[in-house]
Amino acid sequence: MFDKQVEKAFAWLDENLSGMVADLKSLVSIPSISTDGEHPRELETCAEAVCGLMKKAGLNNIQIIRTGDSNPFAYGEWLGAPGQPTLFLYSHHDVQPVNFASHWLSPPWELTSREGRLFGRGSADDKGAIIAQLGAIAAWTKTYGSLPVNVKVLVEGEEEVGSKNLMQFFQENRERIQADTIVVCDTENIRVGTPSITYSLRGIVTLQVEARSAKIPVHSGMAGGAVADSALALCQVLSRLFWGRGPLPIPGYYDSVRPLTPAEKKTIGEMPDESAGLKNTLGIPAGVDWVTEKGCSILEQTWRKPAVTVIAMEASSIKGASNQVLPSATALVSCRIVPDQDPKQVFKQLNDFLSSNPPWGIEIDVKPHGNFVDWWITDPRGPAFEAAMRALSKGFGTNPVSIGCGGTIGFVRPLVELLGGAPALLLGIEDPDSNAHAPNESLHQGDWLKLMKSLACLFAETAKGKSN
């Protein structure tokens, strides 16, 4: 029974793709930027637009929800399948700023089709996921008037600023969001055409490192060479993190790192080497090497190895700079952590490593910047994952793969725990060419449609698993 229903749902998606492109275009046109605090009206407008799309897809109990001082969340549900499993679907409607406007080849707030891709800020991260999830729901409600499972849909409004209120929302609305399976469409496929389920995420610990040598700046002609240069001292402190092509030189940093299993090593080893294409995509000059540990592939390095990145430095503005010995300089250091590192222990290790024996005896102050986010890993087996594998195989027409992700989605682990260990399916919507957060962000239109079909099929496969 379900197979024929899925075929009709697929046909509905094929016939209505142009309408869903139009829906995505309407969302992309709203600059729902959350990172600068200057777009509250646009965030409200986008949440309202999402609610309208939820209604059109056939959801009920639709509303805009806030928790504390949060940006608006959009919520809707369909609970007309008693006795069947419930899926909790997550995406987000807030986006990054344009950034490097001159590098965009088309207007960032105008969805533009080019070479099989849909370009625009938020097209891939994550407004395309909103339409994909609602499209899959509509494929059932418009064809049959019902779904084979229950669904609860949350579209968050502050993912790009760390989802600072999301866990409070989950705690306050535990009964509302209770579900058997979590479905998140905010990750990447390993390549175009290959559906991917992400089973591991790195965590993140960010530190602020400040070097202080004096209370006030001093003329470099009068005191240069005599007074400690805080900017130079900070650079020397940060240079301790240089690892060449070996492990990070932080004492004890790898003591708790969980090694790859033989199965994981085999999976990574079977992945094609696409490093040359990645270099071209990123614009890395020919003479610049990868900085992975020797013998470690890019995938292993980014999925399951710790990383330390200096993401910001500040001493004095180049514009208007004067000849001064600067009294202080500050940097932000981002640490990606992996199973089984402890965020608090990582902070202590970095603090001890960077603040000991400072150059010229200057003050080095290390403190947390933002919240620590833990890593997450799961075993991609069991009924929910088997249903997802079957659905992705039918939707994409090829076998899916299980992959890791070097990024962080902070709510996944605590939400899984809150829902009593509910399996979390992280399904890819982006691909290596999506340029999320960067100029010319885009979504592969063919894979987008295949994801919609996979989600529509997932509803049936989940119900089928229950009936079996």
Image (cartoon, helix red, strand yellow):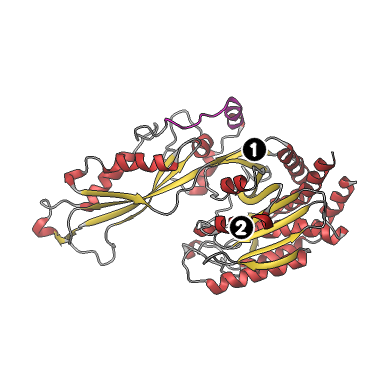
Residue 416 relative to residue 363: left or right: right
Q: Which amino acid does the dot numbered 2 rest on?
A: Asp
Stretch of the chain drawn in magenta = 255-268
Residue 240 is drawn in which quadrant? top left
Point out residue 137 in the picture as x, y percentages from the top left corner: 77, 57
Amino acid tagged 1: Ser
**Left or right for 385, reference 262:** right
Asked whether disc 2 touches disc 1, contact meaning CB atoms under 8 Å apart, the reply is no
Location of residue 462 with respect to 154 vertically, above or below? above
* Residue underneath mark 1: 402
Residue placed farthest to the left in the image? 222
Quarter of the rendering containing residue 56: bottom right
Label ID, residue 449: none
Residue at left 47%, top 28%?
Answer: 295
Q: Is residue 68 magenta?
A: no
At 52% from the left and 67% from the top, the residue drawn is 69
Q: Which residue is nearer to you in this view: 268 or 466?
A: 466
**Looking at the picture, how far across and down is residue 12, in whole percent?**
83, 58
Spatial CA span between label 2 and label 1: 21 Å
Rate crowding at label 1 as few (under 14), some (14 to 19) or many (20 or more) other CA atoms within 10 Å: many
Q: Nearer the viewer, residue 257 or 283?
A: 257
Q: Is residue 257 magenta?
A: yes
Above or below — where is 249 with respect to 230?
above
Residue at figure coordinates x 79%, y 57% from the top left: 13
The residue that disc 2 covers is 126
